[in-house]
């Protein structure tokens, strides 16, 4: 099992990026969450099988149509255990 926290920057709000991330994560069987940040970035946590986490994290570099990702900044996730994927409110 692998877990990762990502901060995605660029044109990633107002284009369905969160919904796209949630669809990708659930399609790959991941737990975690995604939310918009008040600074215009998107933040996500993915927990699951190594290959699935890597695949969704790599997809975040591209994003959905209309996205223009300029940076994906990974860090370790050390928060509480997660068992499903959620879309959280903006922070």
Image (cartoon, rainbow, N blue to C red):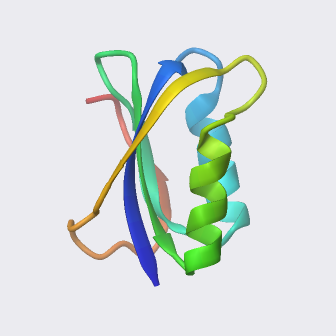
Residue located 69% across and 35% down the image? 62
Residue located 21% across and 66% down the image? 79
Where is residue 69 drawn, in percent x and y? 58, 24
Name the residue nearer the viewer: 58 or 78: 58
Name the residue nearer the viewer: 31 or 61: 61
Name the residue nearer the viewer: 78 or 22: 78
Where is residue 56 drawn, in percent x and y? 63, 56
Q: Residue furthest left?
A: 79
Where is residue 75 drawn, in percent x and y? 30, 54
Say which quadrant the C terminus sits in: top left
Toward which corner of the image does residue 39 lie, by quadrant?
top left
Residue located 69% across and 53% down the image? 24
Q: Residue furthest bottom?
A: 1
Q: In the picture shown, does residue 2 fall above or below 15?
A: below
Q: In the picture shown, does residue 70 fall above or below 48?
A: above
In-image side of 88 versus 50 (left or right): left
Q: Residue furthest right?
A: 65
In-image side of 66 versus 11 (left or right): right
What is the total number of numbered labels drawn onto the structure image?
Answer: 0
Toward which corner of the image does residue 9 lie, by quadrant?
top left
Residue located 63% across and 51% down the image? 58
């Amino acid at each position: 099992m692998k877990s990762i926290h990502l901060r995605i920057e660029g044109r990633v709000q107002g284009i369905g990026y969160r919904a796209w991330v949630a669809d990708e994560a659930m399609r790959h069987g991941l737990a975690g969450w995604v939310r918009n940040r008040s600074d215009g970035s998107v933040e996500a946590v993915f927990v699951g099988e190594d290959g699935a986490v890597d695949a969704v994290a790599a997809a975040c570099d591209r994003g959905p149509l209309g996205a223009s990702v300029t940076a994906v900044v990974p860090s370790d996730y050390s928060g509480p255990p997660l068992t499903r994927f959620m879309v959280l409110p903006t922070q």
